[in-house]
Image (cartoon, rainbow, N blue to C red):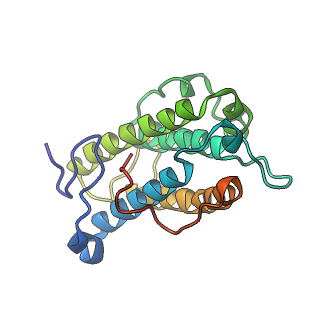
Amino acid sequence: MTSTFGFTPGQPPEWDVERFMRGDEVDTAVITLERNRLTFAWKCADVAAAGMSLRLGASSVTLGGLLKHLAWVEELYFQHRLAGRAFMSPFDALDLERDWDDWAWATAADDTPDALRALWVETVHRSRASLTEALSRGGLDQTTHDGMSLRRLLADMIEEYARHTGHADLLREHVDGATGEGAPSDFPVP
């Protein structure tokens, strides 16, 4: 089943130039989020363990920590806030008050790069399915389980990715010199 804005549950939206350039509010929000996810995935692709744990200066931010943090945010926003569902493992063991800021940064070094990327991809697929389900019931004005509009939720997620993709860009450049604004056209959509 395809949603009204062109993607099937668990799959990214189709990259349609017309919808990208002239889409409605839903198209614009979803495509912008997907573009940010794609660029973030590209920044974290093919990085070994040493690169995943690299830090710049006094910052605790690492590529591995960013993957785990954004997986956590995907799960929090799309499963908990939007769909009202229980968290998947390992998020089901977290305390929302205590673990919000530090958990991902503190534990990412314990995971392999492949495990971190797989966790993030799994949460993104779950998020896409939850968003498709929500949009099949209505537009961006609908209220999530915790009282925010779907519009606000998507804006927050776009902001989260924009901020952290900037961090990932700096870290990736330091790892191997790779730079660039957007993923190449042949980079696979996660």
> Could you tell me which quadrant the C terminus lies in?
top left
Residue 136 in sight here: yes
Q: Is residue 111 above or below residue 70?
A: above
Splitting the image into 4 quarters, where does residue 70 fall? Answer: top right
Instruction: Write the residue at 42% across / 34% down.
Output: 122
Task: Report whether residue 153 is seen.
Answer: no
Residue at the outermost front position: 176
| Spot occupied by residue 133 in the image (x, y as percentages of width and height) | 26, 43
Name the residue rendered at 62%, 63% in the picture: 166
Residue 101: image location, x then y, percent: 70, 42
In the picture provided, is 46 more to the left or to the right than 138? Answer: right
State which quadrant residue 38 falls in.
bottom left
**What x and y, as percent, mark residue 107?**
70, 31
Q: Measured along the vertical axis of the image, is residue 138 above or below residue 9? A: below
In the displayed image of the protein, which residue is found farthest to the right?
Answer: 58
Q: Taking 140 as reference, is 123 above or below it?
A: above
Tell me where residue 141 appears, x and y as whole percent: 33, 60
**Left or right: where 186 falls relative to 50:** left
Q: Which image quarter is the N terminus in? A: top left
Question: Which residue shows up at 30% across the image and 50% down it?
Answer: 12
Q: Is residue 99 left or right of residue 24?
A: right
Q: How many marks?
A: 0
* Residue sitting farthest toward the bottom: 22
